[in-house]
Image: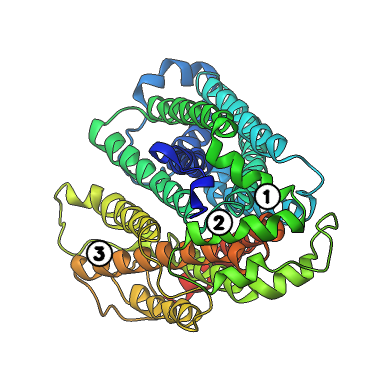
Amino acid sequence: MTTSHQPQDRYKAVWLIFFMLGLGTLLPWNFFMTATMYFTNRLDKSYNMSLVTAEMNKDVEASAAPAAPSPERSFLSAIFNNVMTLCAMLPLLLFTCLNSFLHQRIPQSLRILGSLVAILLVFMITAILVKVQMDALPFFIITMIKIMFINSFGAILQGSLFGLAGLLPISYTAPIMSGQGLAGFFSSVAMICAIASGSELSESAFGYFITACGVIILTIICYLGLPQLEFYRYYQQHKLEGPGEQETKLDLISKGEEPGTGKEEPRISAPNSQPTSNSPSIRAILKNISVLAFSVCFVFTVTIGLFPAVTAEVKSSIAGISAWRHYFIPVSCFLTFNIFDWLGRSLTAIFMWPGKDSHWLPSLVVARLVFVPLLMLCNVHPRKYLPVVFEHDAWFIFFVAAFAFSNGYLASLCMCFGPKKVKPAEAETAGAIMAFFLCLGLALGAVFSFLFRAIV
């Protein structure tokens, strides 16, 4: 009878804004990775010819379709992917960790808006540099610095965003995960369109970076509109209220966010003897969310350990000399993975099983280890030790689809449940810690990818 005092999310405006924020978090980086061929090609060209020759022959750049490696490939081009991964993962992990501890000292709006503006500036510079001739070494160094900046601010943005979502009902973490999943889908489509058009790498890269700039600007506009919505302000104010007011109001919030589940009401409505003015204990919060934190870390360790280090090396067994050989990896590996990963993330918006306290959740997370041998035994080449058991393309596509769907669904469940295992005043900190363990899983997966690829 008192739920009428709780405002509704009219037209799902807050949900859609969180979806856009999730999309804006990963879309720029996904487009940056899609342009890897542009960076390596440019390093080779800068190494193999003078600036004058490069200017005369800029219309003869390689197409976006996969091509055989140049016999005169430069050293910087050869190490680009490895150094890029290192420059991406280390700042991502470091700044996500720092955000977990420092978010209480830096205003949320400064962290989110500042990160978005910084990433926008980096991509504007990147787009401009597409048209500027430069020697290989300075171009390589500047590119790595930009990668470090993008992932540093991206880590702050992602951690702050999950912390912000932790203050709202449980269903508002799902649109962030869904938006991040759709970012990968867009980048895959862009890759396929570039191959189909046969456009020059420089033109494709310029389009990627300008598109990323447009999405970031739209994301900034969405975030600026968030405080104007009554639904968002209603939940935001509970972070600032004392336990006396929370005891009477949070009862309504818990019922409004999960009707029919009585387990959550006592946890968040019971007053705590510790004043809310004190900073939440990170150790106590981590103890409450430890299973979910390690679960999301394990999910991404397995995923990044295999994708794309192993999956991108699979060869089609039916393509022959047809055009399918050019589209096999972009479609079967990247597009299939991103579509089913997005579907898995999006499913949590309407269906959440198992529950946050169920033993099934960590069990299903560990069960994903089965994909390690399944994908290794596909038609991966070159290979040294393991036999090919699943040679046909259909096996590989099926495994990738199941692999991606389980990644998106289980990771999204963990990220949704994490902030709901603690008191409302600790939800933002719990969300930031969950984001740290997500990034830890990405970093560990990058390390294990070398081992998994070496075993094949």
Is 453 drawn above or below residue 241 in the view shown?
below
Locate residue 105 relative to residue 123 in the image: left or right: right
Query: Percent from the top left, x then y, of residue 196?
Result: 23, 36
Locate residue 318 relative to residue 304 in the image: left or right: left
Is 385 drawn above or below residue 113 in the view shown?
below
Examine the rendering and report whether any part of residue 447 can be seen.
no
**The C terminus sits in image quarter:** bottom left
Q: As rendered, which of 311 and 39 lies closer to the eye?
A: 311
- At horizontal 35% and vertical 59% (from top left) the residue drawn is 350
Number of numbered discs overlaid on the protein picture: 3
Is 270 drawn above or below residue 387 in the view shown?
above
Residue farthest to the front, as pictured: 1
Q: Which badge, 3 or 1, is on the more N-terminal residue?
A: 1
Q: Are marks 3 and 1 in contact (CB under 8 Å)?
A: no
- At horizontal 40% and vertical 47% (from top left) the residue drawn is 184
Q: Marks 1/2: CA distance?
A: 10 Å
Q: As rendered, which of 228 and 366 lies closer to the eye?
A: 228
Q: Residues within 10 Å of mark 2 (few under 14, many from 20)?
A: many
What amino acid is labelled 2 in the image?
Ile
Q: Residues within 10 Å of mark 1 (few under 14, many from 20)?
A: some
User: Mark number for residue 238?
Assistant: 1
Q: Residues within 10 Å of mark 3 (few under 14, many from 20)?
A: some
Q: Are marks 3 and 2 in contact (CB under 8 Å)?
A: no
Query: Percent from the top left, x then y, of residue 108?
Result: 70, 41
What amino acid is labelled 3 in the image?
Ile
Query: Percent from the top left, x then y, of residue 279?
Result: 83, 57
Tell me which corner region of the image, top left, top right, bottom left or bottom right, holds residue 434: bottom right
- For disc 2, the marked residue is 253
Q: Which badge, 1 or 2, is on the more N-terminal residue?
A: 1
Identify the element where label 2 is drawn.
helix
Q: Are marks 1 and 2 in contact (CB under 8 Å)?
A: yes
What amino acid is labelled 1 in the image?
His
